[in-house]
Image (spheres, rainbow, N blue to C red):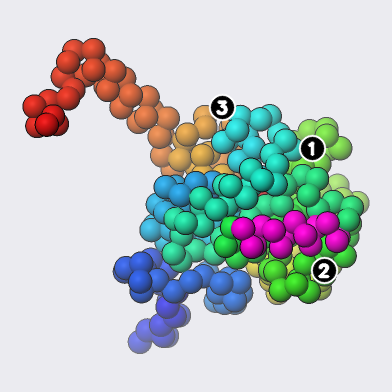
């Protein structure tokens, strides 16, 4: 990232590298600078080398190897089944495709809850085996000791509040969280606690936009929203949703920037037809 003071006095943060060697790494400090400069942070998920490379080349700030891999890569109904080894595999593939973006890995369900020592081991394993730059996990007050322990080991931590999909069976539903004052008040306190504990950013998922904006303004660290309105310091979407690879998941917060499902189906139909008609391969495509 380059910061330039232009003649008009506007600070410009260039996020598209001209060549991979010139690309300056996005760090947790960069995200802090973006928040201070009032420039929204763009984050997307990736789980493999090829997609991560494309997102990185496009200039994305943060790539999350989300446990949404459980849904979009493995076809599970929830994020609960994905294992640590599977997350590590996805993170290794992703990191190989990235030259510039900050890569954060979700700690999967069961790999950190209730035992901060075990959580530290998990986080160290993720960092050692993947080459990623930090970890994310869900929760507020209940994970405070875990955050402190992981940070003590020098590993950056991103928090995740609001709708936390690993607790879906406790919530019982994917509806908007913290609509009532009691839950909103807990969320405000948890956000404060995560900042004080040393988290470098917090994902706010599916909460009222007004609350997300209030929390974002009250914190020094950036918030990254998903279904949390435009008042967050950045936004994240699951790439498969944003690019229209998944079309059976339609919450109002998803904007589809492409319909890759249609493009892929139509390309595959064309291929089948070319094969059937002996139009492929041509003479030029043969030896
Ligand atoms: O797993 C994931 O993709 C996430 C994002 C939705 C924030 O946690």
Asked if residue 42 can be seen in this view, the reply is no
The quarter in which the C terminus is drawn is top left
Q: Residue at x 52, y 32 (%)?
A: 246
Question: What residue is pinned by disc 2?
Answer: 149
Region of the chain picked out in magenta, as a range: 116-129
Badge 1: residue crowd in 10 Å (few <14, some 14–19, many ≥20): some
Q: Secondary structure at mark 1?
A: helix
The vertical placement of 239 against 193, above or below, is above
Mark 3 or mark 2, which has the lower sequence index?
2
Instruction: Check residue 78 for magenta coloring.
Output: no
Image spot of residue 11 (x, y percent): 45, 80
Q: Foreground mark, 3 or 2?
A: 2
Q: Are marks 3 and 1 in contact (CB under 8 Å)?
A: no
Badge 3: residue crowd in 10 Å (few <14, some 14–19, many ≥20): few
Q: Foreground mark, 1 or 2?
A: 2
Res. 168 mark: 1
CA gap, disc 3 and disc 1: 19 Å
Question: What residue is pinned by disc 3?
Answer: 248
Q: Secondary structure at mark 3?
A: loop
Specify the quadrant of the image occupied by residue 78.
top right
Which of the pair 266/98 is nearer the observer? Answer: 98
């Amino acid at each position: 990232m380059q910061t330039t003071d232009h003649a008009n006095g506007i600070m410009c943060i260039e996020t598209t590298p001209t060549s991979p060697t010139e690309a300056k790494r996005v760090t947790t400090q960069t995200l802090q600078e973006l928040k201070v400069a009032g420039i929204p942070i763009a984050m997307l998920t990736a789980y493999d080398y090829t997609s991560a490379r494309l997102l990185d080349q496009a200039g994305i700030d943060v790539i999350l190897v989300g446990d949404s891999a459980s849904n979009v890569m493995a076809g599970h109904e929830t994020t609960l089944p994905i294992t640590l080894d599977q997350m590590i595999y996805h993170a290794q593939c992703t990191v190989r495709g990235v030259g510039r973006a900050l890569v954060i890995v979700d700690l999967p369900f069961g790999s950190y809850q209730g035992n901060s020592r075990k959580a530290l081991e998990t986080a160290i394993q993720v960092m050692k085996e993947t080459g990623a730059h930090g970890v994310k996990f869900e929760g507020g007050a209940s994970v405070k000791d875990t955050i402190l322990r992981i940070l003590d080991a020098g590993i950056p931590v991103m928090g995740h509040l609001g709708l936390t999909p690993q607790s879906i069976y406790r919530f019982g539903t994917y509806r908007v969280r913290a609509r009532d004052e009691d839950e909103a008040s807990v969320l405000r306190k948890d956000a404060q606690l995560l900042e004080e504990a040393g988290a470098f950013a917090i994902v706010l998922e599916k909460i009222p936009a007004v609350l997300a904006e209030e929390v974002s303004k009250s914190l020094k660290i950036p918030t990254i929203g998903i279904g949390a309105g435009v008042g967050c310091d950045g936004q994240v979407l699951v790439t498969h949703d944003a690019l229209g690879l998944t079309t059976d998941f339609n919450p109002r917060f998803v904007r589809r920037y492409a319909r890759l499902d249609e493009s892929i189906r139509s390309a595959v139909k064309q291929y089948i037809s070319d094969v059937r008609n002996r139009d492929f391969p041509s003479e030029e495509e043969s030896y």
